[in-house]
Amino acid sequence: MVNNDDLRVFAMAARKASFAAAAAELGMSPAYVSKRIGILEETLGVKLFHRTTRRVVITEDGERIYARAQAILDNLDQLFDEVAEQRSTPRGQLRISSSFGFGRNVVAPAIARLAERHPALQVRFEVFDRVVDIVEEGFDLDVRVGDEIAPDLIARKLKSNHRVLCASPAYVDKHGAPKHLQDLSSHNCLAIKERDLPFGVWRLRGPAGDETVKVTGSLSTNHGEIALQWAIEGAGIVLRSLWDAQAHIDAGRLVQLLPDYRQDANVWAVYPQRLGGSAKVRVCVEFLAEYLST
């Protein structure tokens, strides 16, 4: 008989293309992962991976079995979800991803509250500076700032949000405020390579519709919080979400520039179609919507 836990170990190793990475993800040792996959290979009578000293590569048989294994695991998860829903108690592991700044400042505190309310859930939360392929990487839910969402995913809007242009009063006093969007090309702008933001190209919506401006500057980063801090210190102009910038604008540490221009960047819960009926995902999404509305 095939052990379902061995299928989970195998599926994670296949996604990560590494026994060590799968072990770290599952909280096991690489030796134990290798042992369980060896047992699964013996049970099935096929070789699942080509192993070298540096990496593992899934075999053709492994690719075929991975697809079947994922379907079996999805069906098991759905079964557990249905039972949990009948008990009104979501349970099991829930893997959630988000971006650096929003994830740390907003999503992480919300998840802590979620775990208090539903102690039968085991939540694994990870943050990235890129858009996560939640299907390929095995996440149940991505909490995303930005409106670019693939059509094969389910998305629920959690909160309205947009990005604004801002700089410190000291920067404006020294360099002046841009009067037109294209004036930004002659200013020191703080470019961010962050998830869905194109690097050095700012697309905003204004009175004449959508416009694009190419910006440059002496400082750039892949972390929005760093760029915001640079802006507060007078280093340049930043394009940042209201959820992050509004408190600094209200306190006078930043001033909004070109207020007729904005970049839509709403907050979404995004999850795979196969989890559309998942009780634990539904409970999490509803909780996040409630949490962010306060």
Image (spheres, rainbow, N blue to C red):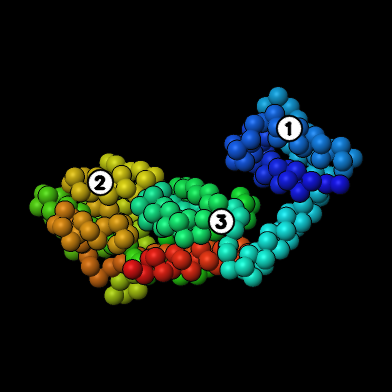
Of circles 1 and 3, which is in front?
3
* Residue located 61% across and 55% down the image: 92
Direction from residue 100 to residue 173 in the image, left or right: left
The one nearer the camera, 114 or 204, is 114
Label 2 belongs to which residue? 229
* Mark before the other along the chain sequence, 2 or 3: 3
Q: Nearer the viewer, residue 42 or 121?
A: 121
SS at mark 1 in the image: helix
- Disc 2 and disc 3: Cα gap in Å? 39 Å
Work out whether mark 1 precedes mark 3 in sequence or the reverse, and give the earlier one.
Answer: 1
The kind of residue tagged 1 is Ser
- Residue beneath the point at 66% across and 31% down: 30
Q: CA distance from mark 1 to mark 2?
A: 45 Å
What is the spatial separation of the Cα atoms under label 1 and label 3, in whole angstroms? 29 Å
Contact between marks 1 and 2 (CB within 8 A): the answer is no
Residue 120, numbered label: 3
Q: Position of residue 88 (x, y in %)?
A: 58, 68
Residue type highlighted by circle 3: Ala
Q: Which mark is residue 183?
A: none
The mark total stands at 3
Mark 1 — residue?
34
Q: Is residue 283 above or below residue 229?
A: below
Q: Amino acid under label 2?
A: Gln
CB under 8 Å between callouts 1 and 3?
Answer: no
* Circles 2, 3 touching at the beta carbon (< 8 Å): no
Direction top: furthest residue? 53
**Quarter of the figure that contains the C terminus:** bottom left
Q: Position of residue 44 (x, y in %)?
A: 87, 43
Q: Quadrant of residue 260?
A: bottom left
Q: Secondary structure at mark 2?
A: helix
